Amino acid sequence: MPKTPFINRELSWLAFNRRVLEESLDPALPLLERVKFLAIVSSNLDEFFMVRVGGLQLLLEQGKETPDPSGLTPAEQLVEISRQAHQMVEDQYGCFLKDLEPRLAEAGIRRLAMSELVAQQDMYLQLMFEHEVFPVVTPMSIDLDDPFPLLSGLGINLFVRLQNPRETDQAPRFAVIAVPKGLPRFITVPTDTGYHYVLLENLIEANVNQLFPGEPIAECVPFRITRNADMSVREDLAGDLLDKMREVLTERKLSTCVRLEVSHRVSATTLSYIKTMLHLHDEDIYPTPGPLDMAAYFRLASMSGFENLKLEPWPPQAPPDTQEGVSLFEIVSRQDLLLCHPFDSFDPIIRLIEEAADDPHVLAIKQILYRTSDNSPIVAALARAADRGKHVTVLVELKARFDEARNIEWATALEHAGVQVIYGLKGLKTHAKICIIVRREPSGVRRYLHFGTGNYNERTARLYTDISYMTCNEDYGVDASAFFNTITGYSQPVKYRKLEAAPAGLRERVLELIENEIQRKTQGQEARIMAKMNSLADPALIEALYRASQAGVPIQLNVRGICCLCPGVPGVSENIAVVSIVDRFLEHSRILYFHNGGDPLVFISSADWMPRNLDRRVELLIPVEDPASSRRLIDILETCLKDTSKARRLQADGAYVRVKPTGKRKALRSQETMYLHAREASKAAQKAALNTLEPERPDNGKS
C-alpha cells in the first residue's frame, strides 16, 4: 500500500456499478424497477469500457508504466478490471436469466424463443420479416485476406459461418449482418394475455438462410463490439473547433475495439477468427448466455400497462413559492429560491427562461449549456428571445462526451436563430451551470440568476437529484457577469465577490475552507465538514481531508460513485465516514458544509472533487447565504447522511457495506423523506392559497 491510502479510481467505479447491480438483485423492489437497474449496469459498463478501459489500453500501447496514486500500473489495473467486470457480467446474466425472466414470465412479460412460437405467431413474424426486415438487412461477405468490416460500436451484429458444400480443406466462408438500428429491438408477438416479445436479432437469425439461398449455414451467433472513445481534440492545432469535433465523432467509428461481447454458443473456430481480426486478447472477450446490450431493457422497464411491477410514482411537486400566475421575476425579486429536483419540479427554471424570452423589459440572456434534451423548451425559448431582438449569448460545450452530435446540431440551429453562440474554451470543458437574465426595471437594470448542479435538461431533471438556486442578489450578479465575460472573452480570471471558479481558484478555496476547520479544531473550537458529491478522486483534497481527520475534525461524506479516499484508517482517517446512496433517482447534487465556528458556510457546486473538474474544466462554487436556502441544504445533507435504507458505508479496504437501522428504529430512506417533504410543502402552499381572501379589485369602468 502506498504511504497515503488511496483507492484506485477504476476499481472504485466498478464498486459503484456493483452497488447498482445489487439493486437489481433486491427482491424487495418491483420487477421492472429491478430490470431498470440491470439496464443501468450495462449502460454504465458501455461507457466505462469506451472511456476508461480505452484510455488504459492506449497508455499500455504507449509503454506507460507509471503507477496511479493507489500504486497500480495501467497493466495491473486492466488485469483487475477484467476480473471484476467478467464476474459482474456473470452475476448480471445470472440475475436476469435465473430470477428476473422467470418472474417476468409469471407476470405476463415473456421473451419467446423462435422455437416456442405457435403457428399463428410464427406466421405473423414470417410476414414481418419478409416485408419489414428482409428489405433492410444487408449481409457483408468476409474474405480472410480482407480487413474486417467497419462495424459501429455498441451495435448488435450476427456473425455467420457458411458450411463448405464440399468436404475439402478449403477455409470456411464468413459473413456479417448488422442488425438494423432503425427497426425495433423488441418485436411484439400477438398473444391473448400479457406482453410477449422476440428480439430482432433472433428473428433474423431464424431466417438467415433466406439471406444466403442455397448455402448451408454452419453457425450464426450475435456479437457486439465496443470501440475506444477516449479521444480528444488537439485544440492547439484546431483552427475550427466545430469541424474538429465532427472529426472526433468520425474517429470514434474507426477506433480500435476494446471489448467483444458474443453469444456463449460461439464456436472456437468463429471466436478465434473474430479475435484475430479485431486484435483482441482473451481478457477482452465477454461470452454472454443471454441477450446482448441489456441497456436496451430500459424500454421494457418503462413500458406502460404493467404499473403493478413498478414503483409508486413520485411526481415532481410544485414548489411552494412559485405559484402559477405570478411572474418568476416578481417572486425572485422578493426572495431567493432554492429547489431540490426532482422532488421540486424543474418547471420554474423553464418558466423563468420562457418569461425572459417574452418579457419586453428583458435586455439580454446569457447561458451555458452543457447537455440538454431533444426538442428542448429552453433552447426554443432562447431562439425566440433572439428573434424578438434580445441579446442572447449561449456558450455551448461541444466537448460534452457522447452529446457532441446533438450539441453541434442545436448550436447550429441557435446560430441560425440569431443567437451569439460560443463553442467552449480552448483546452477546457465548460461544465458550470448558470443563466443570467438582464432586465430593465424602474429602479434600474437588474440581473436575475440561476445556478445549478445539473444540466438544463427537463428530462433528466426528473431522474437526477440536483439543486437549483435563483437569486437577484447584486453581488452574485456582478460576479456572474464577470465570470461569463471571462469565459466568452477569453480574458484573465478576476477576483470575485462571492463565487469561485475552476480551474483558477476553486480547489484553493475548498482547501482554505478545510484548513479553516483544522485551525478551529486545533484551537479547541467545534468543527465539522459535510459534503455531497458524485466523485472524490483529487489527491490534494483527499490529503487535506486526511489532515483534518488527524486534527480531530469530524467529516461526513456522501459520495455516490468514485471515492478514492480510504475512511476509517487508524491514524489517518478514523474521523471520516463515507456513504453512497443508490436509489430510484441518480444522486447528482453537490453540496458542501463547513461549520465555521457556528456560522456555517454552505455551498452548491457544478464540480466534483476530481482533477479533471478542478484542473481541466470551467466550474463554479456558489455560496448559499440566504438563511432559508442554506438551512434546507443542511437538511438535505443530514438526511442523506442518516439514510439506513439505500446507503452503503465505505470500509477502509474499499468494500461497501449496507447501512442498517439500529435497534427497533424504522429504516430512513432519504429520497423518500425528501419527496414527502416536498409533497407536504406543496400541499400546504396550495391550501394556504385557497384560504387566502383576495379583495375584488375595481375594473375601472370596463364592465
Image: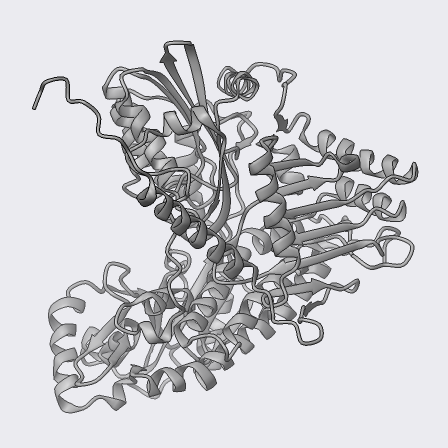
The image quarter containing residue 163 is bottom left
The image quarter containing residue 72 is bottom right
Q: Is residue 536 left or right of residue 346?
A: right
Taking the spot 61% from the left edge, 61% from the top edge, the residue there is 16
- Given residues 343 and 325, the one toward you in this image is 325
Q: Position of residue 363 (x, y in %)?
A: 34, 14
342 lies above or below 670: above
Q: Position of residue 382 (x, y in %)?
A: 31, 27
Query: Which residue is farthest left?
Result: 703
Q: Position of residue 369 (x, y in %)?
A: 42, 33
The answer to whether residue 605 shows anywhere in this view is no
Taking the spot 53% from the left edge, 77% from the top edge, the residue there is 25
Q: Quadrant of the N terminus?
A: bottom right
- Given residues 73 and 636, the one toward you in this image is 636
The image quarter containing residue 655 is bottom right
- Given residues 408 and 534, the one toward you in this image is 534
Taking the spot 37% from the left edge, 25% from the top edge, the residue there is 330
- Given residues 173 and 596, the one toward you in this image is 596
572 lies above or below 514: below
The answer to whether residue 362 shows anywhere in this view is yes
137 lies above or below 508: below
Q: Is residue 574 left or right of residue 594?
A: right
Q: Position of residue 34 (x, y in %)?
A: 45, 72
689 lies above or below 479: below
